[in-house]
Image: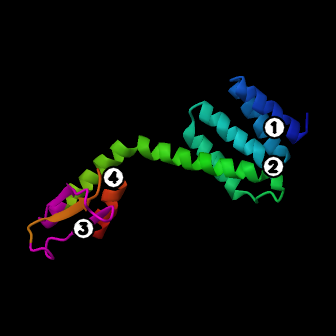
Amino acid sequence: PDNPYVLNSYAGLKNKRKQHAEAMLLFERAIDLLPTYPNPRYGLALCLIERGDIDAALDTLDGLFASPASSDLRHAPVYSEARCTYLQLRETRAHAAEKTVLARVQELLDAYSAATDIPIRIIENAQLATDAKVELAWRYQCPYHVIVTKDKPSPYLLMHQLESI
């Protein structure tokens, strides 16, 4: 059929039956027929998630958000769910990369220490009022900088504090 609404529904059914390859073709056909219809883009993203292709799902959602938003109020829940899914995928991706990123941040911390002869120490302090702070060596009359964190630091928080130093 050449009806994007029927194609989208049929693709959704195929996806639920774990027939992902067929579902993807139907979603893509629906997108080609009516690019402003958000449902097939979101459905395609869900299908890609089921297949374990998070990067392609994120790209598909990026395409959904980049296209003009539908003025049809019935599509509002689709955009809302797509935003939630997008956030979850980004979070999943960040957590998956955390060890790699932490290793890279440690390399940067070591490189800074080697280049300046001022080491950087990381200390946890549960009493800290903010997520983290930096104590600069020259300000605290200390031979090293200190990054103080409230909890176990994420690599992203450490990188932010290193940029402050």
Report the front residue among 21 and 160.
160
Residue 125 falls in which quadrant of the image? bottom left
Give the spatial CA distance, label 3 vs label 1: 52 Å
Of pointers 3 and 1, the one earlier in the residue sequence: 1
Describe the element under mark 4 as helix, strand or loop. Answer: helix
Describe the element under mark 1 as helix, strand or loop. Answer: helix
Point out the stretch of residues depicted in magenta. Answer: 113-141
Describe the element under mark 2 as helix, strand or loop. Answer: loop
Give the spatial CA distance, label 4 vs label 3: 15 Å
For disc 3, the marked residue is 134
Residue 66 falls in which quadrant of the image? bottom right
For disc 2, the marked residue is 37
Badge 2: residue crowd in 10 Å (few <14, some 14–19, many ≥20) = many
Whether label 2 touches label 1, CB < 8 Å: yes
How far across and how far down the image is residue 129, in percent?
30, 65
How far across and how far down the image is residue 48, in percent?
63, 35
Of pointers 2 and 1, the one earlier in the residue sequence: 1
Q: How many marks?
A: 4
Describe the element under mark 3 as helix, strand or loop. Answer: strand
Q: Based on the picture, tell me whether residue 46 belongs to the magenta stretch.
A: no
